[in-house]
Image (cartoon, grey):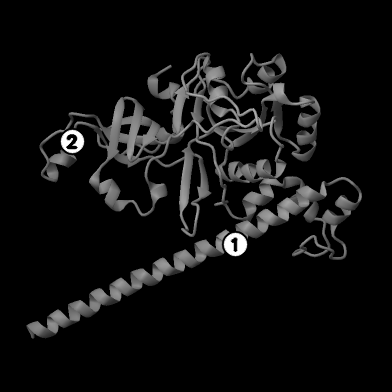
């Protein structure tokens, strides 16, 4: 297996490089640190984006993220394009000239009032959503993560970690399975060897060149799980607090590691807030059982809040749908609709600014012509 193939290269990326400068090399971003990117592939080490790349990037989401494939000029190499722009001195770091289109992208809305997409990881096949059974299990938060994962185009798997600290991990797992149809749910303890049941469930995802991302709140044991899968203590971890069974935040940056089995694992810092970036269709995908029921409602715009002929409410009344799942579905729909309105408002404001700048430029041009005449 070639180096690129081992790192997840596929025909999807091969098809994008027909017109690429022959002096450039292909590499995958395996770590990001304050605008610098550690890469692996046909070029190794640290890299930075070119000035032209930085100039043409419209938003922060256009910059490389962990998991991205990029075209780079290796360190100590001057490309023909550099010579054409008057540069003759080689860079001490590799220079990223292009980011290839993403096959999938995990994104969330930036915290605060900014209307901005924040890329968590790119080109991910599967996402392990990690929660801790030692804490009060928050299924609503898992459903929020599922909306993000389905919108990315990846496959979610729920991992209920710290099963050794739970009174009845089997009952907890079955309760989550009942709430989340069609999703693999695994109870495990990252502090001990994985059980045969856990290994059998995870085996289809832990295959060579398959990219997996770990998502979850701080302290749920993601870094400990990475070390368990690696078979060595490669990532720093901190012990749980005895007062509440919660772990301490240890991961500060996203990074991609290769497991002994050949799978590729992206560890991410714990998320304190998760604001949706996807639209209402992403919510429908995460709640496919509710969306399927809603197609039988009498009214196409049924809000499932007491309207006559509501198939969703009928399922709740009959005990076939958890009322809390319906409530969370409605909550996430409202949030997605609100975010969509923010996107539209921001887009309209950007168009208005562009037209204003064009008008000002035209006025300046006319004034200069009048002075010349």
Mark 1 lies on a secondary structure that is helix
Local packing at callout 1 (Cα closer than 10 Å; few below 14, some 14-19, many 20+) is some
Report the quarter where the N terminus lies: top left
Instruction: Identify the mark at residue 79; answer none if there is no mark.
Output: 2
Write down the quadrant of residue 13 in the picture. top left
* Image spot of residue 274 (x, y percent): 57, 47
Left or right: residue 21 compared with residue 309: left
* Image spot of residue 19 (x, y percent): 30, 39
Mark 2 lies on a secondary structure that is loop
C-alpha distance separating marks 1 and 2: 46 Å
Instruction: Identify the mark at residue 338; answer none if there is no mark.
Output: 1
Task: Name the residue nearer the viewer: 138 or 64.
Answer: 138
* Image spot of residue 233 (x, y percent): 49, 17
Point out the tag, 1 or 2, that comes first from the N-terminus.
2
Report the quarter where the C terminus lies: bottom left
In front of the other: label 1 or label 2? 1
* Image spot of residue 311 (x, y percent): 85, 56
Write down the quadrant of residue 356 in the picture. bottom left
């Amino acid at each position: 297996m070639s180096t690129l193939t081992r790192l997840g290269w596929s025909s999807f990326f091969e098809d994008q490089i027909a017109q690429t400068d022959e002096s450039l090399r292909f590499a995958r971003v395996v770590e990001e640190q304050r605008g610098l990117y550690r890469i692996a592939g046909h070029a190794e080490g640290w890299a930075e984006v070119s000035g032209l790349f930085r100039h043409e990037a419209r938003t922060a989401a256009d910059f490389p993220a962990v998991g991205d494939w990029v075209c780079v000029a290796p360190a100590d190499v001057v490309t023909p394009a550099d010579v054409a722009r008057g540069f003759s001195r080689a860079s001490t770091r590799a220079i990223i000239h292009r980011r290839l289109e993403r096959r999938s992208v995990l994104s969330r809305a930036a915290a605060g009032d900014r209307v901005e997409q924040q890329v968590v990881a790119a080109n991910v096949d599967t996402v392990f959503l990690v929660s801790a059974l030692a804490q009060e299990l928050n299924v609503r938060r898992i459903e929020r993560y599922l909306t993000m994962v389905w919108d990315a185009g990846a496959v979610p798997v729920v991992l209920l970690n710290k099963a050794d600290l739970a009174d009845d991990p089997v009952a907890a797992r079955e309760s989550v399975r009942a709430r989340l149809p069609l999703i693999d749910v695994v109870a495990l303890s990252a502090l001990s060897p994985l059980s045969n049941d856990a290994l059998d469930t995870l085996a289809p995802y832990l295959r060579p060149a398959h990219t997996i991302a770990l998502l979850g709140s701080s302290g749920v044991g993601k870094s400990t799980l990475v070390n368990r899968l690696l078979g060595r203590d490669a990532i720093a971890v901190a012990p749980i607090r005895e007062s509440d069974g919660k772990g301490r935040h240890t991961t500060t940056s996203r990074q991609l590691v290769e497991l002994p089995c050949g799978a590729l694992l992206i560890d991410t810092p714990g998320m304190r807030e998760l604001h949706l970036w996807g639209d209402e269709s992403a919510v429908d995908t995460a709640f496919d059982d509710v969306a399927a029921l809603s197609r039988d409602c009498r009214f196409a715009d049924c809000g499932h809040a007491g309207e006559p002929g509501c198939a969703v409410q009928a399922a709740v009344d009959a005990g076939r749908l958890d009322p809390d799942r319906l409530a969370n579905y409605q909550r996430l729909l409202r949030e997605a609709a609100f975010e969509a309105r923010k996107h539209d408002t921001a887009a309209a404001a950007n168009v208005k600014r562009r037209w204003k700048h064009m008008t000002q430029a035209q006025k300046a041009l006319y004034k200069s012509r009048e002075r010349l005449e």
